[in-house]
Image (cartoon, rainbow, N blue to C red):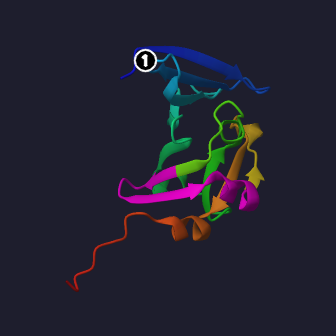
Amino acid sequence: MDLKSQIFANDDSHGNRLYMRVFFNEQNQFSNATIYLKLQAEEKRRQLGNMDFVTHTFHCKRSSAKHYHNKAKGYGFNWTVLSDTLLNIQKIHLVIDENEEYLFNVSLIKEYGKFLNFKQQGFELQRFIPFSLIKNFRINKPETDDE
């Protein structure tokens, strides 16, 4: 059971702001957090995902129509969040299009991801990983009609 929460914020050199609402457990330890990004050029903040401090897992969602990056042939992840030593993210739980789930180590992004930075458009530094690598870590296999 979470007893209290606190908001932390961090600005980058381009005026973008990361927000993290951290929830604490009965022992006053970090339990989980919701992470948001507010781009300087936009009015509203975006929810990047949720962090589970117990399992060191970052939970996030992507829509293929909105988030798939054709040049990278995959998806981008906020590098500031992934490389934060306080968060200590070890796993990514990714849900694509509300029904495909993947669970993989963050080391996959660190090893095979490519930096693409669209700072001219006001976006934060992201590391993109091809979907061809992500698809190997699907955790809910599609049902077959053979049964």
Q: Residues within 10 Å of mark 1 (few under 14, many from 20)?
A: few
Q: Which residue: 48% across, 18% down? A: 27
Q: Where the C terminus falls, by quadrant?
A: bottom left
* SS for dot 1: loop
Q: Which residue is mark 1?
A: 26
Q: Please state which of residues 99 and 141 is positioned toward the viewer in this rendering.
A: 141
Residue 130: x, y in percent? Answer: 63, 64
- Which residue is outermost to the bottom? 146
| Residue 122 in view of the camera | yes
- Which residue is outermost to the right? 13
Residue 44: x, y in percent? Answer: 51, 25
Q: Is residue 56 above or below residue 97?
A: above
Q: Which residue: 53% across, 26% down? A: 45
Residue 104: x, y in percent? Answer: 56, 58
**Does the segment drawn in magenta span residue 73?**
no
**Does the segment drawn in magenta span residue 101?**
yes
Q: Which residue: 43% across, 17% down? A: 26
In-image side of 92 versus 82 (left or right): left
Magenta stretch, residue numbers: 93-113
Residue 31: x, y in percent? Answer: 48, 27
Q: Please state which of residues 74 and 133 is positioned toward the viewer in this rendering.
A: 133
Q: Which residue: 52% across, 32% down? A: 46
In-image side of 118 versus 96 (left or right): right
